[in-house]
Each structure stands twice: as C-alpha cells, then as structure tokens.
Amino acid sequence: MFHAARAALATRGRSARTHSGILRIFSKEFVKTGLIEAEYARVFSAEQEDREFCDYDASFRITKDTAQSRIQEANEFVERIERFLKER
C-alpha cells in the first residue's frame, strides 16, 4: 500500500518519506479532490495504525480474521491505485 500510494503521489509530482506524510498528501491530492474514494484513505490509515502498534507495542496482537481482512483491504487498495494509474 505504501508504494502504491507513493506511485499515485508521483503522478502529481508529490512525495513523502513516511506513512503519515503519504497519507496526509494522498488524502489532500486524491480523496478531497474526488479522484479516489475516501474508503481507501481510511484503509491506509487503519493499516498504518496496526503497523505502528505491532512495531511499538510487544503485547499487541492481531487476530487471524483481522489479518485476513487487512490483506483483502490491502489488495483492494493496490487494485484501486492500479486502476487510477491506468485511467490517467
């Protein structure tokens, strides 16, 4: 998702190094302008939050169902960005 969002940002001449920076610019450039549906920014944000919890909280656990859901959401996010890139 990180790299798919970066690819989308590159089409606007924009870039960021961090997940939070990418999310902020992605939301401004694509969601607020109506180019990409808001659900994809929410998915990116939820994935980022889970990743940060996993990185910094040794007690944080994700259930198998949640993991499967996140994988599906990530695939849908990448597919949506691919569609956007092809439509350009």
Image: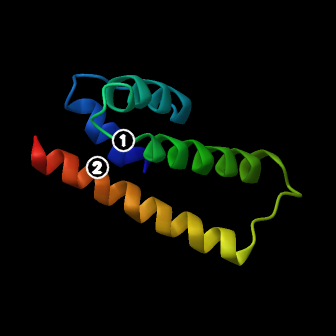
At 28% from the left and 49% from the top, the residue drawn is: 81
Q: Which mark is residue 79?
A: none
Query: What residue does disc 1 label?
Result: 5
Question: What crowding class fits label 1: few (fewer than 14 Cα within 10 Å), some (14-19), or many (20 or more)?
Answer: many
Q: Which mark is residue 81?
A: 2
Q: Nearer the viewer, residue 10 or 26?
A: 26
**Residue type indicated by callout 1:** Ala
Assess whether mark 2 and mark 1 are in contact (beta carbons under 8 angstroms).
Answer: yes
Horizontal relation, residue 83 to residue 18: left or right: left
Residue 52 image position (x, y, % from top left): 69, 44
**Residue type indicated by callout 2:** Ile
At 83% from the left and 57% from the top, the residue drawn is: 60
Q: Furthest residue to the right?
A: 59
- Badge 2 marks a residue whose secondary structure is helix
At 67% from the left and 44% from the top, the residue drawn is: 49
Horizontal relation, residue 35 to residue 59: left or right: left
Q: Nearer the viewer, mark 1 or mark 2?
A: 2
At 11% from the left and 46% from the top, the residue drawn is: 87
In this view, 82 is above or below 15: below
- Badge 1 marks a residue whose secondary structure is helix
Q: Nearer the viewer, residue 85 or 58?
A: 85
Residue 58 image position (x, y, % from top left): 85, 55
